């Protein structure tokens, strides 16, 4: 199924793993953010990999 929503909860430790895994979706500067205007369905595998690889498990998505 296509991903409809992606968000990052509080607690990010800024390892930049999400940005390295899916630079089209995530940006890490002072805080980690999900970029606006992204068609998440184009990056389903990358988003799932970023969420699964997050060491503090703060990346979430819904289908």
Image: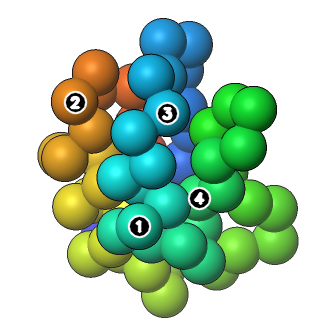
Residue at the (18%, 46%) spot, across then down: 52
Q: Is residue 6 above or below residue 35?
A: above
Can you tell which of label 4 and label 3 is closer to the viewer? 3
Q: Are marks 2 and 1 in contact (CB under 8 Å)?
A: no
- Mark 4 to mark 3 CA distance (whole Å): 11 Å
The first of marks 3 and 1 along the sequence is 3
Residue underneath mark 2: 55
Kindly identify which residue carries mark 3: 14
Q: Which mark is residue 34?
A: none
Compare marks 3 and 2 and give the one earlier in the sequence. Answer: 3
Up/down of 37 relative to 31, above or below: below
Disc 4 packing (10 Å; few <14; some 14–19; many ≥20): many
Residue that numbered label 4 is attached to: 26
Residue ID for mark 1: 20
| Residue 34 image offset from top left, x and y in percent | 66, 51
Image location (x, y in percent) of residue 36:
81, 62
């Amino acid at each position: 199924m296509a991903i409809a929503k992606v968000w990052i909860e509080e607690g990010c430790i800024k390892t930049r793993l999400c940005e390295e895994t899916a630079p089209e979706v995530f940006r890490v500067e002072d805080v980690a953010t999900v970029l606006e205007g992204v068609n998440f369905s184009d990056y389903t595998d990358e988003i799932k990999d970023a969420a699964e690889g997050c060491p503090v498990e703060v990346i979430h998505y819904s289908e």
